[in-house]
Amino acid sequence: MTVPGNEAELLTRVVSGDREAFDAVMRGHQDRVFSVCLRILGDREKALDATQDTFLTVFRKAGQFQGRSAVGTWIYRIAVNTCYDQLRRAQRRPSESLPDHVDPSDPSAEEAIESAAVRPEIEGALAQLPADFRNAVILSDLEGLSLPEVAEILGVPIGTVKSRVFRGRRLLAKHLGNQNHQ
Amino acid sequence: MHDHPLDLIAALADGSLSDEAEARALIESCQECRDEYRAQTEVIGWLAAAPAAEMTDLEKAALHRDLWTELRREPGKASTTPWWQRLSYVAAGLFVVAGLVGVLNNVEFAGGGEASDTTVAEASAEDGAVEDAPTEEVPFVAQGNDDSESATETTAATAETSAGGEDSLPLPFQELADEARAAQADRVATLGTDRDVEECLARLALDEHVVVDEIEPDQIYLLVMPEDPEAEPIVTFVALPVCEIVYVG
């Protein structure tokens, strides 16, 4: 995996508190970070919170980036871990699930929610998957990341990712009643 | 099923094989493999058809605003000025704010005259509206106004301030300062994203300064100080949107 020089340089500037550099990093990755968070958390408001927490962590830990992966991969790993943390907190403190929050002053939000929606039956089937399988499928098949990238983000070997993606798809198919395999 | 190379089938389904011949031959000869391949490709197709999840423009703007608000609370990162020094700046500035706000409550600014960067406001005793009213040095320059009624108000307000000294300010210092700060807390936190502010400070050669407070009794006044912690902490007030320095000291 290569490290885009300009992005790594941007992170170096972020370490010194360069606001423009940080804004550039955000602009480059905020959409996918949000998308990953939304797929994992299944709630728009929580996804927005997780996106903010992700970039707070990126800013705080920019100095720890060692260039062993692409900046984006490093950021998405932070995003996934942030979502894990949020899910763990939610499990410890269960609360009533709220519908997607829509800013009443933002008419485009409704449209955004609809356009981003996976078919409800697929969304439901995804929600039933074990978290490890679900996240591998989300990153690979929904976000279109490569298997090495997914492995880096999830912190597991590529073989494990292959297995999780394969088994996740199989469970999805099973939940959706479209195949006969276990 | 475990005897079948399922990873090969999965790789064929997601298109990651460089040579598909072996996998193609496999699914031709094995019904179970064929079913598995079909199930995998169907799921991939459903997921690939899902549109990207995107934030709206307002959500993006809120994200950036909230993020910088949060980062500004952290010492030493979003700003190079140590928190304790910025705090001392604010404390020093509040003394000035008290005087400024106190007089702003009484002085008419609507004339649109020119401001200068001196520290003395020469209230309109020269106008002769109230000949005996004493004048008082106040920490800004009131914008000139030839309207006699306004001049009268200005002079009278100055006289009131002068007669009682600092104790006769319209509101006690602490209450005044708290009011100004509380009313502007949110906006101050987001000033860094305000392009107008940045452009104004650059135009006034104050781009190496940091905004530490803001008040807006009638119009917006920024309290700025040098960002360089080694620099002398000179307080400067900038009036927006006219973008003029109204006080340096």
Image (cartoon, grey):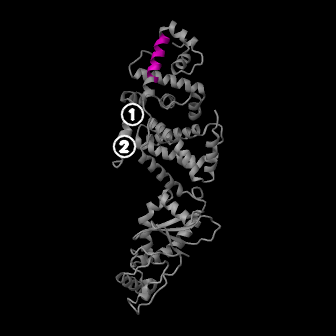
**Which residue is painted at 39% across and 74% down in the image?**
B110
Q: Amino acid at mark 1?
A: Ala
Q: Position of residue B2 (x, y in %)?
A: 53, 14
Q: Residue at x 61, y 60 (%)?
A: B80
Residue drawn at (41%, 69%) of the image = B219
Give the letter of the chain under mark 2: A
Helix, strand or loop at label 2? It is helix
Outermost residue toward the bottom? Answer: B132
Specify the amino acid type for callout 2: Ser
Quarter location, residue B174: bottom left
According to the image, label 1 marks what residue?
A: A117
Does dot 1 land on a helix, a strand or a loop?
A: loop
Q: Is residue A73 magenta?
A: no
Q: Are the residues flagged by discs 2 and 1 from a single subunit? A: yes
**Percent position of residue B50, x then y:** 42, 30
- The chain under label 1 reads A
Residue located beneath label 2 in the image: A108
The magenta stretch is B32-44
* Gap between marks 2 and 1 measured at Cα: 14 Å
- Determine crowd level at label 2: few under 14, some 14-19, many 20+ residues with C-alpha closer than 10 A: some
Dividing the image into 4 quarters, which one contains the C terminus of chain A? Answer: top left
Instruction: Give the main secondary structure, helix, strand or loop, of the magenta stretch.
Output: helix
Count of marks placed on residues: 2
